[in-house]
Image (cartoon, rainbow, N blue to C red):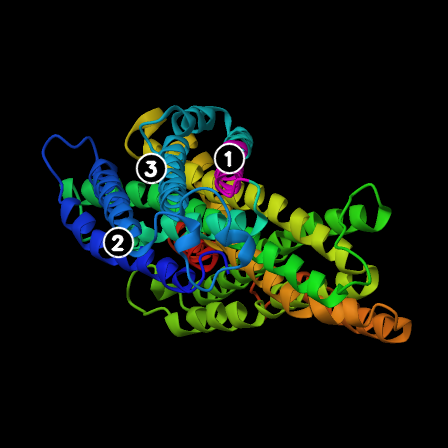
Amino acid sequence: MAFGNIGLVFPLIVPAIGVITAIIGIFVVAPRQRDRSGMSAINRGFFVSAVISAILVAGAAFVFLPARFSGLTGAEAGILGHAGSPRVLAIGAVLIGLVLASTIQLLTGYFTETTRRPVRDIADSSTTGPATVILSGVSTGLESGVYSALLIGAAVYGAFLLGTGNATLALFAVALAGTGLLTTVGVIVSMDSFGPVTDNAQGIAEMSGDVTGEGAQVLTHLDAVGNTTKPITKGIAIATAVLAATALYGAFRTAVTSALARASSFSLSIDRPNDLVGLMVGAAVVFLFASLLIRAVGRAAQRVVVEVREQFRLHPGIMDYSEQPEYGRVVDICTRDSLRELATPGLLAVLTPIAVGFAFGYAPLGSYLAGAIAAGVLMAVFLANSGGAWDNAKKLVEDGVHGGKGSEAHAATVIGDTVGDPFKDTAGPAINPLIKVMNLVSLLIATSVVKYSGNVGLRVAVTVVALVIVVGSIVIAKRRSSHAATGGPGAAGEATGPGGSAGAEHQEQSAKTATA
């Protein structure tokens, strides 16, 4: 153990401090007159919480940790003789995590806030149609992913440097950086909850028609702030996933080394074809995973639209409020689809590492994890930030830019927002658990992969079974796609029913509900 007995306790003390600082940070969020927007108040709470956390963690390090590594109890002999101070390592690692969280907050805010240039550029592109809105949003998401990946990479590298050449201490520093990032978890969870609450409040107010004027404007602005907080929390979540995955990667190496014993040493090099294949498969799985989730949302949205059209056709009184819609049928569609569509991505996350490990060996499995982590970071940030930017570009147009509601520019941004919903609300957030699950599965099977490396029959059998299940589930899911838009008689008939454009607006809202 890196820090011996205290190494089991100190990582728990750090997030415990975060509980206290979160309470303080949430009280500081109270808006003030000089705040430019709701985001200013949220940023103040976050940064105040981060600063107090850094001070308290430094105090805890001096209280609980010795000045020299030789003062640790239960640590390895190599660590007891290591030069340096456990206090410096712990404080430095936690500070790296706090700085990473703060920079992700600022960076994501730049790419998704309505007052910043990227969102304004997307709104400006709406004057030339939905195609340019999509292109502008995609380019914004791709660019933001690069900077976020560089920040996370720098944090991991900085934590490794704190180990000063000792691999065990370096990995422990990476894990501590993850706990340091989570000292602000109370504020982060509050920010994450803020987005859906304001989104639903604004949607209810808009659909009821009872909230107008200044009240409606306030809700719209709060919803725009929520569209910024959601990608911020997703970016911080993917950063924690990478830090955790790096620490688990070290555990994977330890498990493999222990299983190899003296037979051979752990070796991973992409100049070998097997290892390179594992790297590419790991990156490809992230893309396939995102594809499955986005397609699943699209199928659910299609079924909802078909159901709405059917209800308009059979119950024309819906548009003049003489009949009530059958809301339960739409809720049933969304609930059944959300549970059913979970199976295929789940099987992909669990069984693909098993297939790669038993087919190619432990080294390609390690490369597979590296490819999944690298591609996962870029994909998750791209999806979250592009979706948030599209949503806020729509809010900007609704505030009166380029013609406001009902204009061609508004119609273009609505399409961008609809495309962005499965990006930021489904596929982007899901990559975080994907990375963690694949790392945990790889860690669990590492010993078996090494132990049975000489049993060709068993390896082939396990690989074939895993591949058959994964491929079969994907084929079944894709077959559902071809039937998603089919319904009962007249389901694909007249789209709007009585009420014309109003019916179309109801359909659009229903489809967006499904994507959420």
The residue at the point 69 percent across, 65 percent down is 258
The residue at the point 32 percent across, 54 percent down is 185
Left or right? Give the position of 389 relative to 33. right
Of all residues, the one furthest to the right in this rendering is 457
Task: Work out whether mark 3 precedes mark 2 in sequence or the reverse, and give the earlier one.
Answer: 2
Q: Mark 2 is on which residue type?
A: Val
Task: State how far apart marks 1 and 2 are (Cα).
Answer: 29 Å
Q: Which mark is residue 154?
A: 1
Secondary structure under tag 1 reads helix
Task: Work out whether mark 3 precedes mark 1 in sequence or the reverse, and give the earlier one.
Answer: 1
Q: Which mark is residue 63?
A: 2
Foreground residue, 247 or 513? 247
Task: Work out whether mark 1 precedes mark 2 in sequence or the reverse, and give the earlier one.
Answer: 2
Picture quarter containing residue 269?
Answer: top right
| Residue pointed to by mark 3 | 395
Q: Can residue 40 be seen in this view?
A: yes
Range of residues picked out in magenta: 144-164
Task: State how far apart marks 3 and 1 are (Cα).
Answer: 34 Å
Q: Mark 3 is on which residue type?
A: Lys
